Each structure stands twice: as structure tokens, then as C-alpha cells.
Image: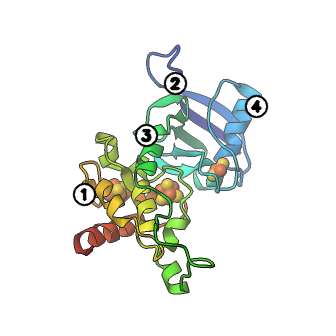
């Protein structure tokens, strides 16, 4: 089938503002948007910039706005989009070139919630044991691939870049509800700050955008409740 791929392009070194460029490509219905971007880059215009690595929904590097919805280009099939496909960079982060955004503000929020196990208690002889039920409690967060599709679909993040965003809260959730972790108090300081969890207005865009099916808004609500009812 013939597909028109409309890509929002921007090179800050020479363009005054972003503009759409249309490319005609021949595609199979089961081609992915990532395949189309490769066809353009390899056969038509080598200056097109986008990120990708694994090509299989694992690395999280190719989240983009496809026909108005945040998705992974490597997991989105042409047959589900039609013959005109519009691709734009994810919103709310500075564009470096074309579909490549500066992810540093996103990863700064990730680092801020201390996404690692905190436990100063003397270690046991062997591993810190955990029951299957305790492991299940934070399972959702372990599936996050840090693609930023959630955070960059959040209207609060668009208007207030100081909001740490849903991805960082999902990562905080992953450790707050880990029975082996003792860092809740430290994380609550960040989550309770001006850019923290109370900025969330329960818009649910994040949940709809997550390519891993993580119930992001639900996890955010669990973190809020834990902050209110936690006793130290
Ligand atoms: Fe991506 Fe989902 Fe993780 Fe957000 S929660 S960064 S959408 S995988
Ligand atoms: Fe934003 Fe998700 Fe909350 S879209 S407002 S973080 S529910
Ligand atoms: Fe790795 Fe799409 S290229 S998630």
C-alpha cells in the first residue's frame, strides 16, 4: 500500500520553527512505523533524526506522537493507522532535532525519586527474603521501560515542567511498596514537594499512553494514599 508519512521536522541550527515534511513510502500493512522511518532515512533523506535501539518494545527509546497518540514506533503497525500517518516528537521536552528530544529533564525526575533499593539494616547471611505476595505488590512498576510516553502525554507536565511526572512516580511506587526497602521517608520528601505527586490531576492520559499496560494512574493514587496514611 502507498502511505504518506508526515513528519514534524525541526533542525534548530537552520529552521525558524518546526514544519511538516511529507514522504511517500510503499509499505506492507504489517510494517511498523519504525520501518517507515527507516525507509525514509535510508532511501530518501538521511538527515531525518529519530531514536531507536531494540526494535522490539524493550528499550523505550522510540516513543513518539503517532497520529496524535503517544506510542512506540516499533510496536505500531501501519494497518492500524491508515494511509496517512503523522509523526511528531513527544511533547513537553525540548526538541534536539526532528523526533529526538532532550530526555535529561525526564531522567532527572527519575533520579530524584531514588530508583534503587535503600536499606541500611545489616544484611542477612543470604538474600533478603520476600514472599511471592510481597513481590507481587510492586510488580507493575518493574515492567516500566522508561519510554516517557506517560509523562509526555500528561497535560500537567506540558504546562509545568517542574512536575516530576507519572514515570518517576511509577518508579517511586516500585520501591515504596517493596517489603525490603526502607527509603520511603526520603522518597516522600521529593514526592511531597511542589513538583511532586499532588500535581497530578488524575487526567488518565498516562495510563492510556503506556505501551506496557501499566495502570499508571492507579499506582499514582496508591502512592498518594500511602503518603497520607503512612506512619513512621
Ligand atoms: Fe513508558 Fe509506561 Fe514506564 Fe511511562 S510507565 S515510562 S509509559 S513504560
Ligand atoms: Fe497526568 Fe496521569 Fe496524573 S496524565 S494528571 S499524571 S493521571
Ligand atoms: Fe526499543 Fe522501540 S526501539 S522500544
Among the 4 quarters of the image, the one containing residue 91: top left
The numbered mark, 1 or 3, whose residue comes first in the sequence reads: 3
- Residue pictured at 45% horizontal, 49% vertical: 111
- Residue pictured at 72% horizontal, 44% vertical: 27
Camera-side residue of 134 and 27? 134
From this view, report whether residue 71 is shown above or below residue 19. Answer: below
Q: Calculate the distance from the C-alpha at mark 2 to the C-alpha at mark 4.
A: 19 Å
Camera-side residue of 135 and 143? 135
The numbered mark, 3 or 2, whose residue comes first in the sequence reads: 2
Residue 10 numbered mark, or none: 2
Say few, some or many: other residues with alpha carbon within 10 Å of mark 2 (under 14 / 14 to 19 / 20 or more): many
Element type at mark 3: helix
The numbered mark, 1 or 2, whose residue comes first in the sequence reads: 2
The residue tagged 4 is 42
Say few, some or many: other residues with alpha carbon within 10 Å of mark 3 (under 14 / 14 to 19 / 20 or more): some
The numbered mark, 2 or 4, whose residue comes first in the sequence reads: 2
Q: Nearer the viewer, mark 1 or mark 4?
A: 1
Say few, some or many: other residues with alpha carbon within 10 Å of mark 4 (under 14 / 14 to 19 / 20 or more): few
Query: Which residue of the protein is positioned furthest toward the right in this rendering?
Result: 43
Element type at mark 4: helix
Residue 105 numbered mark, or none: 3
Q: Calculate the distance from the C-alpha at mark 1 to the C-alpha at mark 3.
A: 19 Å
Q: Residue 213: in sight, yes or no?
A: no
The residue tagged 1 is 198
Amino acid at each position: 500500500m502507498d502511505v504518506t508519512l508526515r513528519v514534524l521536522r525541526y533542525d534548530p541550527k537552520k529552521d525558524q520553527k518546526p514544519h511538516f515534511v511529507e514522504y511517500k513510502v510503499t509499505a506492507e500493512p504489517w510494517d511498523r512505523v519504525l520501518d517507515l522511518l527507516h525507509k525514509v532515512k535510508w532511501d530518501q533523506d538521511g538527515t531525518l533524526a529519530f531514536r531507536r535501539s531494540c526494535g522490539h518494545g524493550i528499550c523505550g527509546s522510540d516513543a513518539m506522537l503517532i497520529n496524535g497518540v503517544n506510542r512506540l514506533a516499533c510496536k505500531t503497525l501501519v494497518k492500524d493507522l491508515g494511509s496517512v500517518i503523522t509523526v511528531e516528537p513527544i511533547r513537553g521536552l525540548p526538541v534536539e532535532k526532528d523526533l529526538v528530544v532532550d530526555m535529561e529533564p525526564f531522567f532527572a525526575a527519575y533520579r530524584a525519586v531514588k530508583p534503587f533499593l535503600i536499606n541500611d539494616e545489616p544484611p542477612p547471611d543470604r538474600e533478603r527474603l520476600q514472599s511471592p505476595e510481597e513481590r507481587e505488590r510492586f510488580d507493575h512498576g518493574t515492567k516500566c521501560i522508561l519510554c516517557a510516553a506517560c509523562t509526555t502525554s500528561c497535560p500537567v507536565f506540558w504546562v509545568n515542567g517542574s512536575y516530576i511526572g507519572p514515570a518517576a512516580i511509577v518508579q517511586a511506587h516500585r520501591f515504596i511498596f517493596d517489603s525490603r526497602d526502607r527509603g520511603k521517608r526520603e522518597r516522600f520528601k521529593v514526592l511531597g514537594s511542589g513538583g511532586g505527586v499532588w500535581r497530578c490531576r488524575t487526567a488518565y492520559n498516562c495510563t492510556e499512553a503506556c505501551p506496557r499496560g501499566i495502570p499508571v494512574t492507579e499506582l499514582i493514587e496508591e502512592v498518594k494514599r500511602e503518603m497520607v496514611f503512612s506512619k513512621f
